[in-house]
Amino acid sequence: MTDYRDFEQPGDELNDWEYPDEEDSDDESETIPCPHCGADIYEDAVQCPICGQYVAPGARNLWASRSAWWVLLGLLGTGAVLWVLLTGAP
C-alpha cells in the first residue's frame, strides 16, 4: 500500500491566495420554508423531510388568484353546457 505522505515535498503548502474563497463554497445551501408545514428545507429539495409532502418549485394554488365570483361563474357555465348536452336542447 502506498503512503501518500511520502510524495509531499517541502514547499507544497498552499499560499493564502490558493485557498478557495468562502463565497465560492457550495457546501451551504439556502433554505426556504415548506409550503405545507413551514419547516426549513433546502431550496432544491423535492420532498419535505418533516411532513413528506412534495415541493414543486414555483408551484402555486390554482384557485388562489381567482375571486369567488369568477369561480362561481365558471361552475355555472360548465353546468349550463352539461345541461344543454344532456337534455338535447337546441
Image (spheres, helix red, strand yellow):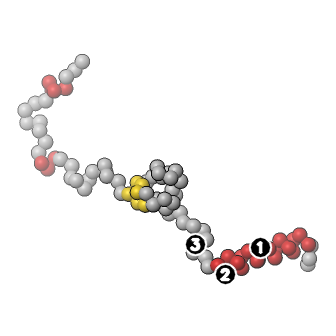
Q: Which mark is residue 69?
A: 2
Residue 25 point in image, percent of width and height: 27, 51
Examine the image and state in which quarter residue 8 appears.
top left
The residue singled out by tag 3 in the image is 64
Marks 2 and 1 sit apart, C-alpha to C-alpha, by: 14 Å
Residue 19 point in image, percent of width and height: 18, 47
- Indicate the quadrant containing the C terminus: top left, top right, bottom left or bottom right: bottom right
Marks 3 and 1 sit apart, C-alpha to C-alpha, by: 20 Å
Query: Nearer the N terminus, badge 3 or badge 1?
Result: 3
Viewer-side label of 2, 1: 2
Q: Amino acid at mark 1?
A: Thr
Answer whether labels 2 and 1 touch (C-beta < 8 Å): no
Q: Left or right: 77 with respect to 11?
A: right
Q: Which mark is residue 78?
A: 1
Q: Left or right: 18 with respect to 44?
A: left
Query: Nearer the N terminus, badge 3 or badge 2?
Result: 3
Marks 3 and 2 sit apart, C-alpha to C-alpha, by: 13 Å
